[in-house]
Amino acid sequence: MISEKIKLAGVVGAGGAGFPTHIKANSKVEFVLANGAECEPLIHKDYELMLHFSAEIIRGMKLLIESTSAKKGYFGIKEKNAAAIELIQNEIKDSSIEMTQLGDFYPAGDEYELVYAATKRLIPPAGLPLNVGCVVNNVESLYNISKANEGIPVTEKFVCIAGAVKHPSTFFAPIGTTFRELIKHAGGTTANDFAVYVGGVMMGKLTFDLDEVVTKTTAGLIILPKNHYLIKRKNQPEENFARIGKSACDQCSYCTEFCPRYLLGYDVQPHKVMRSLQFTKTGAEVWNQMAELCCACGLCTLYSCPEDLFPKEACDNSKKEMRLQGTKFTQTKPVKVHPMKDGRHVQLKQLMQKLQLKDYDVHTPFNPNKLETEQVKILLKQHVGEKAEPVVATGDRVKKDQLVARVPEGKLGANIHASITGMVTHVTDEYIKISC
Ligand code: SF4
Ligand code: SF4
């Protein structure tokens, strides 16, 4: 069964979330959606994958359609990616998969957006695509499904290295490779003092640690000089976000008016969440609720707010507080798409202008030379669910593709395999290190 092969191969959502794919392959749905609507500024790894591996992606999608008994597939892709559309269309060859062409706006690749664009169905508040008969998979997950079907586990990640590097590019790297080596494979940096966004500037995280490693969900790295606008905004103590917000938010509500989830009809209102910073603690528990359905896309903080405040971070905090208090917000009013939704799309070009990224907006061509490394540090938790349990010990010799950690019995998780051939040098609670 394909779902068993997917489980054995350790396939997880490669688009960022890392949900184990065998669970999706085991469900019964009406529609399978391929998510090729990459929208993080500067990251083009899905586009390159579609250009160079369209046959594998469609094979994976058809396997998933079969295993879920879906009646149809939709392939979500941006209209601007004409070359990839043509290749994908040539591979489809029948009527089982339809293209859903999307505008170049952010966040076109959000699951809720994509499900609505393809099927006109609205996922219930805080729900999953499954609740409306859909499963959504990133194109790289589909590629990995086709490999799993051949018995090849996930040991490499397709990554895009962009920003202040000599050769912005896209290539395969063994899971567990350090960021230092990835940057070297892209020719090194063009800035002496730099910082790294992992996974994108909108939803990714900022790091200065080049010893961090690639996981099954690392979409790419954006390298930016330390004095770049985005680094200066992000790299400050969290208390600042609240302090500045408290004194400067004028409740203009632009953050809400451009919020993609609000425009789809969900009760997310970041300007109200900001009130929890402005007043005494009284009322915060009410305003916190307006953050519950936020998808952390970052648009309010990085685009909509004219005062450069941090409503997304205020939402993050509100969600944390609600979790600590064990409270939950339930949307009672019906989900109804805002009449201005289409008119308020934030075009990627406008977003990049605002983020001062235009100078880095270049092609990141596929480099067929795979990165080779002599040491990897493979994390035991690269996915939603439980940590994988090591099945190797220090001193063991392992071959590439060999199982090194497995999903605990009866738990949600994903298997992990050796990404290089060599000797296991460390096994800890967090990772396994292998050296050639
Ligand atoms: S857009 Fe900025 S200033 Fe306006 S309500 Fe939102 S956080 Fe406050
Ligand atoms: S981060 Fe801001 S814009 Fe994005 S969903 Fe949350 S509240 Fe809305």
Image: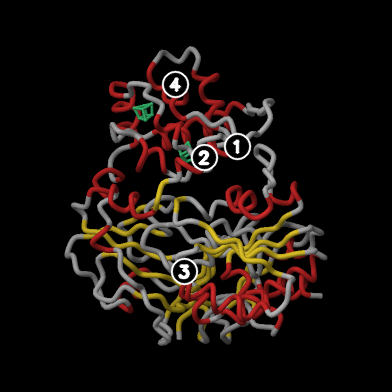
On the image, the x and y values in percent for residue 274 come to 42, 25
Q: Earlier in the sequence, mark 2 or mark 3?
A: 3
Closer to the camera, 339 or 430? 339
Residue underneath mark 4: 276
Left or right for 43, reference 329: left
Q: Residues within 10 Å of mark 2 (few under 14, many from 20)?
A: some
Residue at 52 percent across and 86 percent down: it is: 421
Residue underneath mark 3: 81
Closer mark to the observer between disc 1 and disc 4:
1
Q: Could you say whether the residue bearing mark 2 is in a helix, strand or loop?
A: loop
Q: Are marks 1 and 4 in contact (CB under 8 Å)?
A: no
Closer to the camera, 351 or 330? 351
Q: Earlier in the sequence, mark 1 or mark 4?
A: 4
Q: In what quadrant does ligand 1 lie? A: top left
Residue underneath mark 2: 341
Residue underneath mark 1: 337
Q: Are marks 1 and 3 in contact (CB under 8 Å)?
A: no
Asked if residue 392 shows in the view, the reply is: no
Q: Residues within 10 Å of mark 1 (few under 14, many from 20)?
A: some
On the image, the x and y values in percent for residue 291 come to 52, 31
Q: Earlier in the sequence, mark 2 or mark 4?
A: 4
Closer to the camera, 63 or 408? 63
Tell me where residue 88 sits by quadrant. bottom right
Measured in 3D between alpha carbons, the distance from the residue under mark 2 to the one under mark 4, in whole angstroms, is: 27 Å
Q: Earlier in the sequence, mark 3 or mark 4?
A: 3
Tell me where residue 212 sits by quadrant. bottom left
Q: Which mark is residue 190?
A: none
Measured in 3D between alpha carbons, the distance from the residue under mark 3 to the one under mark 4, in whole angstroms, is: 42 Å
Q: Amino acid at mark 3?
A: Asn
